[in-house]
Image (tube, rainbow, N blue to C red):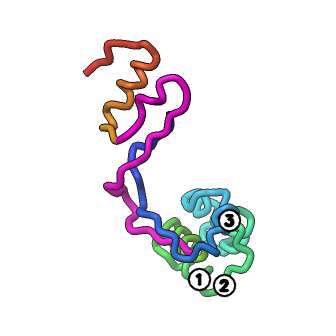
């Protein structure tokens, strides 16, 4: 059984031909920002080594260097280059999918309240009664 506790970001793909960049990104924006030296002069090296960005423009490097929030600036740069946009940086009200395979998979179909998921897992495992 696979699911999520929430959907985040409201992702939209604006330029499908550019999303391949995302496959080259090996670290989160937080981890990339954490690899920057204090004066952020190694931006090009960090993005090349860990995000597949080998052609960082001087203006892009300067934007990250001067940003109050390097994490957000890096995320914005990567999203823009990959042709994706986000409707929010927080949680959305979008329903999340539940996928199941194997014994008991039929219990995880259709819409369900997220609090029913552990109850159904307990049912499949023969654990009961599940606390309310």
| Secondary structure mainly formed by the magenta segment | loop
Tell me the residue at 41%/63% (across/down): 10
Mark 1 and mark 3: span between their CA atoms?
17 Å
Mark 3 and mark 2: Cα distance apart in space: 15 Å
Q: In the image, which residues are magenta?
A: 82-110
Q: Element at badge 3? A: helix
Q: Which residue lies under the disc numbered 3? A: 51
User: Which image quarter is the C terminus in?
Assistant: top left
Q: Is residue 86 above or below residue 125?
A: below
Mark 1 and mark 2 lie on one chain; the one further toward the N terminus is 2
Disc 2 marks which residue? 57
Left or right relative to 6: residue 71: right
Disc 3 + disc 2, Cβ < 8 Å? no
Residue 5 horizontal/vertical position (percent): 40, 43
- Relative side of 108 to 93, left or right: right
Residue drawn at x 66%, y 72% as measured from the top left: 43
Q: Most extreme residue toward the bottom, as rendered?
A: 59
Question: Would you identify the image quadrant in which residue 63 lies?
Answer: bottom right
Mark found first going from the N terminus, 3 or 2: 3
- Residue designated by label 1: 62
Q: Name the element at disc 2.
A: loop
């Amino acid at each position: 059984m696979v699911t999520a506790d929430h959907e985040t970001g409201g992702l939209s793909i604006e330029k499908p031909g550019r999303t391949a960049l995302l496959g080259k990104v090996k670290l989160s924006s937080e981890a990339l920002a954490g690899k920057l030296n204090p004066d952020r002069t190694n931006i090009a090296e960090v993005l090349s080594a860990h995000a597949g960005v080998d052609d960082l423009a001087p203006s892009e490097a300067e934007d990250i260097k001067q940003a109050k929030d390097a994490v957000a600036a890096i995320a914005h740069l990567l999203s823009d280059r990959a042709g994706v946009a986000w409707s929010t940086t927080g949680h959305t009200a979008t329903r999340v999918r539940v996928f199941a395979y194997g014994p008991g998979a039929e219990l995880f179909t259709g819409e369900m309240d997220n609090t029913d998921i552990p109850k159904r897992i307990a049912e499949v495992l023969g654990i009961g009664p599940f606390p309310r």
